[in-house]
Image (spheres, helix red, strand yellow):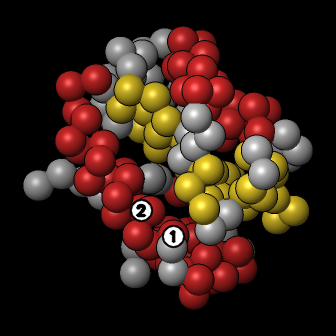
């Protein structure tokens, strides 16, 4: 059975208040959380591919959530980091408060779709987003996300 995004996201890969105020810087700030992950083989290339993908089509998904992602050989396994911005960051016309950066090996596209689909369904729920905005610790954030 493929893991869900909530199972793949670890508390140490979560920032409860990112400092960035623009989209590209925010994507890179969240990606940097997992810079030393053993599952990342080429961090610089991964970041370049994230930004290129977002330029092709905004990764904002609605509800104040964005999923910057790349299917790439720069990762060995699916990696996920998340960042929260209280004031929000504009992704085009949409203000985003939650950014989930995802890297997926090219051969794991199906696992990626399952993981992101689960996460997207959870983030559509207003009650979940409200609780995540109030989470005081990464552990609390993870508990809410895994409900």
| Residue at position x 28%, y 23% in the image | 106
Mark 1 and mark 2 in contact (Cβ < 8 Å)? yes
Disc 2 target residue: 119
Q: Secondary structure at mark 2?
A: helix
30 on left or right of 123: right
| Residue at position x 38%, y 26% in the image | 71
Query: Which quadrant would residue 72 be assigned to in this image?
Result: top left
Q: Nearer the viewer, residue 60 or 135?
A: 60
Disc 1 target residue: 123
Q: Nearer the viewer, residue 144 or 98?
A: 98
On screen, 103 above or below 100? Answer: above
On screen, 65 above or below 18? Answer: below
Position in image of residue 89 (x %, y %): 81, 51
On screen, 92 above or below 49? Answer: below
Per the model, the C-alpha gap separating discs 2 and 1 is 6 Å
| Residue at position x 44%, y 23% in the image | 40
**Residue 64 in sight here:** yes
Position in image of residue 98 (x %, y %): 65, 59
**Number of numbered labels in the structure image:** 2
Q: Secondary structure at mark 1?
A: helix
For residue 15, the mark is: none
Look at the image and tell me in which quarter the N terminus lies.
Answer: bottom left
């Amino acid at each position: 059975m493929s893991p869900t995004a909530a199972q793949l996201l670890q508390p140490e890969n979560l920032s409860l208040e990112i400092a960035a105020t623009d989209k590209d810087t925010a994507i890179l700030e969240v990606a940097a959380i997992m810079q030393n992950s053993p599952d990342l083989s080429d961090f610089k290339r991964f970041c370049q591919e994230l930004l290129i993908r977002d330029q092709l089509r905004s990764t904002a998904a609605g509800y104040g959530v964005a999923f910057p992602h790349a299917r790439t050989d720069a990762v060995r396994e699916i990696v996920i980091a998340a960042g929260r911005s209280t004031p929000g960051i504009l992704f085009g016309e949409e203000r985003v408060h939650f950014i989930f950066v995802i890297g997926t090996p090219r051969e794991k596209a199906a696992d990626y779709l399952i993981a992101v689909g689960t996460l997207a369904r959870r983030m559509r729920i207003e009650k979940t987003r409200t609780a995540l905005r109030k989470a005081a610790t990464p552990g609390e954030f993870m508990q809410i996300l895994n409900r």
